[in-house]
Image (tube, coloured by chain):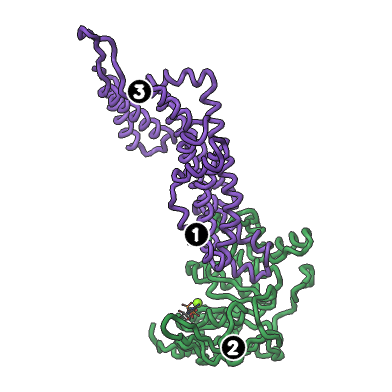
Chain colours: A purple, B green
C-alpha cells in the first residue's frame, strides 16, 4: 500500500488551515492549488483501490490492471497525442466550432433580443416560442442536425449556435425590459430619439447583462461541443474522447476531459476580462 | 434662452419675487389625474390651478403620496393629465422638451459614461469645441473640476447629484424640475447642496419647480411654497416666503412660517 497520497492530503489540509488563519492577503492561486492537489491525491487513492491483480493460469501475479486511469497513467497516456500534435489540432477545431457557433448566436441573438425587449408587442409575440424551444436539450437536436448538415463542421456549429442562442436572446431581452425608467426618461428629456437613443442609452444600459448572458452561453456552448463532436464530426476533443474510448485508451479519455476543463476555464477568464471595461464595470461591482 | 452664450456677461442682480413683473411661465389649469387600477380608479390630483413666474423658485410641499411627483411629471410632459391642461410660454405641453430638464431623486445620470460625457449629454449637436467649453464651465460651477474623467460609481451621492445638476444646466434650460433631488443625501450634504442650488439659481436664473416633503428645505429654497393636501392632491395654500437669502433659520418670521406650514400639513405644532 502506498501512503504518499494520504500524507500529501494531510499536508495540504494543514496548509489550508494555516493559510486561512492568516490575516494577510494570500497569493490568489494558493488555495485553489492546494485543493487541486488534494483532488489529485484522492483520485490516485480511488484509482489504486479499484485496480486488481492480473494472474496467469498458475495463479502467478502478472501485473496490476487499472479499472480507471490514475493521474500518473493519464499524464503518460497524453504524451503521444501531445507530441504528435493531435491534442492541439483537436483542441483548435473544437474552439473553432464553438467560436463560429457562438459568434453566430451572438450576431443574431443580441439584436433580436434587444428588439423584442424594446417593443412590447415583439416580446409578446416572440417570447412564448423562445421559452418553448429553450428547454429542448441541444443533444436532442443531434439527429436533425446530422440529417440537415451531415457529419460535418456545420452540424456541430449549428448545435453550438442553437445552444448559445437561447441564453443570449433571453438575456438581451430581459436587459432591455429592466432598464431603469429614469435612464429612458432622462434620455427622452434631452431629446434622444431613434438610433441615438439606442446607441447612447439602451445599448450601454444593457451591456453588462448582455456580457453576463454571453458568458453563460459560452459555458453552455463549450459543454455542448463535446456532445456534438461525439456524434456529429470526426475531429475535436469530443471526438478524441469517443475515439479513445472505442480503442480502450481510458487514459486519453480522462486526459481529454481535463483538457476540456482547462480550456473552459481559459474561455471563461477571457469573457470575464470584458467585465473590466469602464463602460460596463458599473454593472458588475460598486466601484 | 436655450442658446445662452457661455461668454455672456454676468447675469444682472436678481429681482425679488414681489418686484418682478408678473409674466407667467407655466400655467396649470384644472389638472386632474386618475390612475386606472385593477379594480378601481385612484384619484391622485384634483383641480390643480397654478401659475409659475419666469425665474421663480417654487417649492411643492406635501405628504407622501399626495401626487407631487405626478404633478411634476405632468408639467414636464412625461405624463398626460386626465383633464385640464398645462401650458408653458402659452404653448400646451405634450411631451418632454430639452428646454425643460427634469432632475430625478435617483439622479438619472448614466453609469456607463464619465462625468464629462454625462454633462455633455444635451450638447450633442454643438461643435466639439463649444461642447468642451460649456462642459468645463458647468463642471466648474458645480464644483466637480478634476473629476471629469471619473465614472458615477467612483463618486459620492452628492457629487452624482451635482453631475445631474450640471447636465441639466449645461443646456441652459428655462425650467428645471427637481423631484426630491436631495432626498438620497445625508443631512450635511443636503444643507450644503441647498446653498449651492441657491447660488446657481441666482447666477443662472432658471425657473425651478422643486418637490420636497421637507418643511425646512422648502423654507430655505422657495420664493413661494405650494402646499398640497393628502390624496386626492389639491392645493391647500400657496405660502409666499418673503425672507431674504441667506435665510436666518432663527428669526421669528421663519418660525411663524414654519408653524403655518406644519398646520397646513395637518401636524399642528408637533415636533
Ligand atoms: N403609474 C401609476 N399607476 C398607478 N398609480 C400611480 C402611478 N403613479 C403614481 N401612482 C399613485 O399616485 C399616488 C401619488 O403618487 P406620487 O408619486 O405622485 O406621490 P408623491 O406625492 O410624489 O409621493 P412621495 O412624496 O412619496 O414621492 C400614489 O398613491 C401612487 O401610488
Ligand atoms: Mg414623489
Give left or right: position of B50 versus A287: right
Residue at the spot 52% in from the left edge and 66% down from the top edge: A124
Task: Name the residue nearer the viewer: B97 or B184.
Answer: B97
Q: Chain of mark 1?
A: A
- In this orientation, does residue B261 appear? no
Task: Name the residue nearer the viewer: A41 or A227.
Answer: A227
Q: Which residue is mark 3?
A: A69
Residue at the spot 62% in from the left edge and 79% down from the top edge: B77
Residue at the spot 34% in from the left edge and 30% down from the top edge: A39
Q: CA distance from mark 1 to mark 2?
A: 64 Å
Rate crowding at label 1 as few (under 14), some (14 to 19) or many (20 or more) other CA atoms within 10 Å: few
Task: Name the residue nearer the viewer: A164 or B7.
Answer: A164
Upstream in sequence: badge 1 or badge 3: 3
Secondary structure category for the residue under label 1: helix
Q: Which one is in front in this view, the residue at disc 2 or the one at disc 3?
A: 3
- In this orientation, does residue B90 appear? yes
Q: Which residue is mark 2?
A: B242
Q: Which residue is mark 1?
A: A129
**Place of residue B175 in the rendered image (x, y in percent of width and height, measured from the top left):** 66, 78
Give left or right: position of A57 versus A155: left
Relative to B263, say whether B165 is above or below.
above
**Place of residue A66 in the rendered image (x, y in percent of width and height, measured from the top left):** 31, 20
Secondary structure category for the residue under label 2: loop
Q: Chain of mark 3?
A: A
Amino acid at each position: 500500500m502506498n501512503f504518499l497520497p494520504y500524507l500529501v492530503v494531510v499536508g495540504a489540509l494543514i496548509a489550508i488551515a494555516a493559510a486561512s488563519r492568516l490575516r494577510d492577503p494570500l497569493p490568489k492561486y494558493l488555495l485553489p492549488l492546494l485543493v487541486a492537489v488534494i483532488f489529485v491525491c484522492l483520485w490516485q487513492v480511488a484509482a489504486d483501490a479499484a485496480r486488481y491483480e492480473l494472474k496467469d493460469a498458475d495463479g502467478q501475479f502478472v501485473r496490476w490492471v487499472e479499472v480507471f486511469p490514475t493521474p500518473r497513467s493519464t499524464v503518460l497516456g497524453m504524451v503521444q497525442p501531445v507530441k504528435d500534435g493531435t491534442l492541439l489540432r483537436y483542441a483548435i477545431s473544437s474552439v473553432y466550432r464553438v467560436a463560429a457557433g457562438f459568434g453566430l448566436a451572438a450576431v443574431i441573438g443580441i439584436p433580436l433580443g434587444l428588439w423584442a425587449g424594446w417593443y412590447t408587442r415583439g416580446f409578446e409575440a416572440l417570447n412564448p416560442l423562445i421559452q418553448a424551444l429553450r428547454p429542448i436539450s441541444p443533444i436532442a437536436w443531434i439527429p436533425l442536425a446530422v440529417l440537415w448538415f451531415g457529419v460535418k463542421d456545420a452540424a456541430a456549429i449549428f448545435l453550438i449556435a442553437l445552444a448559445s442562442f437561447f441564453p443570449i436572446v433571453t438575456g438581451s431581452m430581459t436587459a432591455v425590459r429592466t432598464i431603469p425608467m429614469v435612464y429612458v426618461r432622462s434620455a427622452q428629456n434631452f431629446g434622444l430619439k431613434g438610433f441615438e437613443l439606442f446607441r447612447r442609452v439602451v445599448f450601454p444600459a444593457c451591456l453588462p447583462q448582455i456580457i453576463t448572458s454571453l458568458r453563460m452561453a459560452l459555458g453552455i456552448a463549450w459543454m455542448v461541443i463535446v456532445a456534438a463532436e461525439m456524434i456529429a464530426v470526426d475531429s475535436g476533443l469530443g471526438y478524441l474522447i469517443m475515439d479513445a474510448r472505442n480503442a480502450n485508451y481510458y487514459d486519453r479519455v480522462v486526459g481529454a476531459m481535463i483538457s476540456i476543463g482547462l480550456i473552459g476555464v481559459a474561455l471563461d477568464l477571457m469573457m470575464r476580462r470584458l467585465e473590466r471595461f469602464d463602460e460596463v464595470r458599473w454593472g458588475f461591482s460598486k466601484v | 434662452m436655450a442658446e445662452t452664450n457661455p461668454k455672456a456677461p454676468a447675469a444682472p442682480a436678481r429681482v425679488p419675487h414681489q418686484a418682478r413683473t408678473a409674466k407667467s411661465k407655466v400655467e396649470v389649469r384644472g389638472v386632474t389625474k386618475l390612475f386606472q387600477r385593477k379594480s378601481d380608479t385612484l384619484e391622485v390630483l384634483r383641480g390643480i390651478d397654478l401659475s409659475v413666474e419666469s425665474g421663480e423658485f417654487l417649492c411643492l410641499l406635501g405628504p407622501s403620496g399626495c401626487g407631487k411627483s405626478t404633478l411634476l411629471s405632468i408639467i414636464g410632459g412625461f405624463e398626460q393629465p386626465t383633464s385640464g391642461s398645462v401650458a408653458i410660454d402659452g404653448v400646451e405641453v405634450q411631451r418632454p422638451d430639452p428646454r425643460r430638464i427634469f432632475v430625478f431623486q435617483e439622479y438619472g445620470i448614466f453609469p456607463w459614461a464619465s462625468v464629462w460625457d454625462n454633462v455633455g449629454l444635451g450638447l450633442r449637436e454643438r461643435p466639439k469645441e463649444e461642447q468642451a467649453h460649456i462642459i468645463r464651465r458647468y463642471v466648474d460651477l458645480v464644483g466637480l473640476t478634476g473629476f471629469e474623467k471619473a465614472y458615477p460609481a467612483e463618486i459620492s451621492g452628492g457629487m452624482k447629484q451635482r453631475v445631474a445638476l450640471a447636465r441639466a444646466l449645461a443646456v441652459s434650460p428655462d425650467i428645471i424640475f427637481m423631484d426630491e433631488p436631495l432626498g438620497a443625501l445625508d443631512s450635511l450634504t443636503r444643507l450644503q447642496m441647498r446653498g449651492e442650488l441657491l447660488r446657481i439659481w441666482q447666477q443662472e436664473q432658471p425657473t425651478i419647480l422643486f418637490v420636497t416633503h421637507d418643511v425646512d428645505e422648502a423654507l430655505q429654497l422657495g420664493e413661494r411654497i405650494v402646499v398640497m393636501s393628502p390624496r386626492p392632491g389639491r392645493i391647500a395654500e400657496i405660502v409666499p416666503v418673503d425672507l431674504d437669502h441667506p435665510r436666518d433659520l432663527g428669526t421669528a418670521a421663519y418660525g411663524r412660517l414654519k408653524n403655518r406650514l406644519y398646520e397646513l400639513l395637518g401636524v399642528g405644532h408637533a415636533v
